[in-house]
Image (spheres, rainbow, N blue to C red):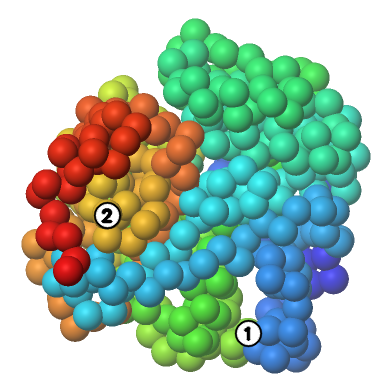
Amino acid sequence: MKFVSGLTCHLCGATYPAQALWVCSECLGPLEVTYDYAAIKKVISRSAIESRPRSLWRYLELLPVESPKTGFNSGFTPLVKAERLAHELGLSELYLKDDSVNHPTFSYKDRVVAIAATRAVELGFQVFGCASTGNLANSVSAHAARLGLPCYVFIPNDLEPNKILGSAIYGPHVVAVEGNYDDVNRLCTQIADRYGWGFANINLRSYYAEGAKTMGFEVAEQLGWRFPDHLVSPVAGGTLLPRIFKGLREFRDVGLVEGTLPRIHAAQPTGSAPVIRALESGAEFPDPVKPNTIAKSLAIGNPADGFQVIKVVKETGGSGAMVTDDEILDAIQLLARTEGIFTEPAGGTTIAATQALIKRGVIRSNESVVICITGNGYKSAEVMRDRVAAPTQIGRSLADFDRVIGSRLKVPA
Ligand SMILES: *Cc1c(COP(=O)(O)O)cnc(C)c1O
Ligand SMILES: [Zn+2]
C-alpha cells in the first residue's frame, strides 16, 4: 500500500482513505483506488518486474494490498501467439490472453479475487463472499478455503452443475437464489450491509477491480513491453474491460511502455448485450435487459460498471459486437480445433465478436490483435454436447480396427 493515495469517486472526484468503502457518500458513484504515480515511476523498472515470480504479484507497486497473502500463483497466464487461428480469421498477428488456465480456478476471476481476498484479510473481515454468475463463486470459495475464512457464495439457481460443484468442493455455504444475477446482487448488497461481511464484488469492489488491471499489465509485458493495435474483451458486470485500459494507461504513466493505447472492443452475447446496445444507440448508460443466453458468465442485464465500459470503448476508438449463441458455439469449436484451447461461452463470445469486427472492417488484416479468453470450457462442457462427434465404436482386435478405420487408410509398404 506504499503507493496507494486513497479512494476517489469516479463521478465527482471526492476522496476517501483506502478502507472498506465502495460508493461515494456524496453522489453514490463508484470509488477507484488512486496511486502516487510519480513515486512509482522512480522505483519501478522492466528489469525489476522481470526478475520477480511469474504471477500477478510481480506488479505489487500498482496493487492495493500490503503484501501477497493467498499463496496462489494467480495471473501471468500465457499470451499465446495464435498462428493457425490467425490464418482462419485472415489476420497476420493474433494473440490469445489465456485465462482459461488461470490459478486456482481457471478463469479471469482468480485475478480479482486474489486482490479482494487479500484486502478482506487486511481489513479484518470475518466472512468472505460474493454474488456470482459461477466463476467468481469458484474463485472466492477456493481463496476462502486457503485463507481459512468462513465463506458464503450466492448464485442464480439456473447455473451449470459443474460451476456449482466447482464452488461446493471447497466447502463454502453455496446459496442458490431464485432469480437472475441482478436479483442475487441486490440481495447481497443488503446482506453485506446488515451482517458486515466482505463481498468481493460489492463492498470490496474497489479492490477487486484493481485485480483486473493485471490482465492489461501482462499483455503489455508479454508482447515485449508494447501495446497491440486492438484488444477484444468480454463484458459482464463491466469490471474487466475498463481495468485492462487502466492497467495499460498506468504502464504508460509510470514510464514502462510508450506508444498509442490499443482500441478496446467490447464483446457480449446477443441475449445479454446492454452495453453493445448502448454503444449502437449512442446512449451513455446501458438500459438494463433480461438475460437469455448460454453464456452464463456474461448474463448480467444491469452491469455495475457499464458506463465505464462505454466510456473506455469510445475513448480508445473501439467498437462493440454482439454475437448469437450459435456463433458462440461455432467459435468455441474453431478455437479448440485451431489452437488446442477449450474455452467456455465467454471465450467463444470474444472470438466470434472478433470475427464480426473483422467483417465490419473495424479490425484490418495487418493489425495486431489480442483476444481475451477468460474462462475454461470444461466447466460448461455440456453446451458442446451436440457439436462433437461420438467416438467410433470398434471391437478389440486389429481386424476390427482394420475393417472400420484401417480400410480407409493407406497402409505403408
Ligand atoms: C466474470 C467474467 C467475465 C467478465 O466479467 P466483468 O464483470 O465484465 O469483469 C468474462 N468472462 C468470464 C469467464 C467471467 O467469469
Ligand atoms: Zn461522488
Give how far across and how far down residue 101 sits, in percent: 54, 53
| Residue depicted at x 33% and y 70% | 82
In the image, which disc is placed on residue 337? Answer: 2
Q: Is residue 108 above or below residue 172?
A: below
The image quarter containing residue 105 is top right
The image quarter containing residue 174 is top right
Residue 193, visible in the rendered structure: no
Q: Which one is in front, 279 or 352?
A: 352
| Residue depicted at x 20% and y 43% | 402
7 horizontally vs 212: left or right: right
Give how far across and how far down residue 298 sits, in percent: 39, 37
Which element is circle 1 on? loop
Residue 333, visible in the rendered structure: yes
Q: Which one is in front, 93 or 293?
A: 93
| Residue depicted at x 68% and y 84% | 50
66 horizontally vs 47: left or right: right
Which element is circle 2 on? helix
Looking at the rendered structure, the kind of residue marked 1 is: Val
Residue highlighted by disc 1: 254
